[in-house]
Amino acid sequence: MKQLWLCGLLASALAVSPAVIFSQNGACSALVFSDIHGLPGDTVCIDLTVENIPSLLSMQLSIAYPEGPLDFIAVNNFQLPGMSAANFGVQGMPGIPPGRLTISWFDPTLNGAVLVDGDVLFSICFKITAPSGGNDVIEIVGTPTSIEVVDAGGNVFSFDEVTGSVMTQDASSNLRAITICADSSACILPVNGSIELSVSGGTPPYTFQGAAPADLLLPVKTSPDLVPATTK
């Protein structure tokens, strides 16, 4: 996943389709599933990462995946304090229907895990049984375990959830915007806003195009993977 930071241009049209667009003053918090490409018969693992979530004390939630096109194998790559397979409910356990995983975790130290953008919480591995051309979505849901996420200060907070996908095709295809976070307070006056864009797929460098008034400034800060902007 590439992060492309734009300051000074609020594009009303982008060349990629966003999965999630959210806007607020300050940081945009999100739990983000990765996108994975593979072929029928491959085993692939999807990461759950954080964006603008500085700490976690506890979390409970459910994860939905398409049973059939994807065969669940295991949860692994545990990165939170004390987390293990025992924190997860999987298909075959009482109360866990097909196509669901549940998680219930808290930090045993009670200090809260300190996180930075892109930190992995854990990974879920599947075997692809769908034919080529499939695009199977993994997402956070509220059943059978309801959603509650708590930071190190003991505060329950809301977040945006970015779905992940398993695509049975070449990794260079299917460019999509993962998150677009509009922040009106991130730039120095007289500029009045910024957009942080994360994308998956495709081949860098990326281009973007947007509609904007003639007197609106073009970006003054971007990532190396972003080429100069155009307006129309």
Image (tube, rainbow, N blue to C red):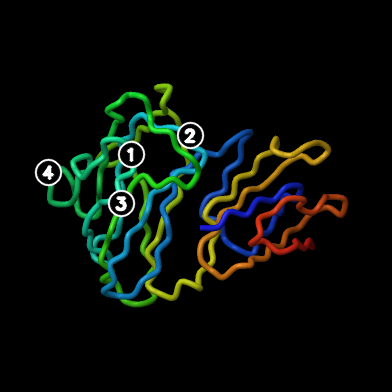
Q: Dot 1 surroundings within 10 Å: few (below 14), some, or many (20 or more)?
A: many
> In the image, is 22 to the left or to the right of 114?
right
> In the image, is 36 to the left or to the right of 100?
right
- Which is more N-terminal, label 2 or label 4? 2
Q: CA distance from mark 1 to mark 3?
A: 21 Å
- Which is more N-terminal, label 4 or label 3? 3
| Residue position marked by numbered label 1 in the rendering | 80
| Residue position marked by numbered label 3 in the rendering | 64
Q: CA distance from mark 3 to mark 4?
A: 16 Å
Q: Which mark is residue 94?
A: 4
Q: Position of residue 147 (x, y in %)?
A: 34, 36
Circle 3 SS class: strand
What amino acid is labelled 2 in the image? Answer: Pro
Looking at the image, is mark 1 or mark 3 nearer the viewer?
1
Circle 4 SS class: loop
- Which is more N-terminal, label 3 or label 1? 3
- Which is more N-terminal, label 3 or label 2? 2
Q: Position of residue 206 (x, y in %)?
A: 64, 66
User: 188 above or below 205?
Assistant: above
What amino acid is labelled 1 in the image? Answer: Leu
Residue beneath the point at 60% across and 52% down: 197
What amino acid is labelled 4 in the image? Answer: Pro
> In the image, is 187 to the left or to the right of 67?
right
| Residue position marked by numbered label 2 in the rendering | 54
Circle 2 SS class: loop
Circle 1 SS class: loop
Q: CA distance from mark 1 to mark 2?
A: 13 Å
Mark 2–mark 3 CB contact (< 8 Å): no
Mark 1–mark 2 CB contact (< 8 Å): no
Looking at the image, is mark 1 or mark 4 nearer the viewer?
1
Mark 1–mark 4 CB contact (< 8 Å): no
Of 107 and 146, the residue lying toward us: 107
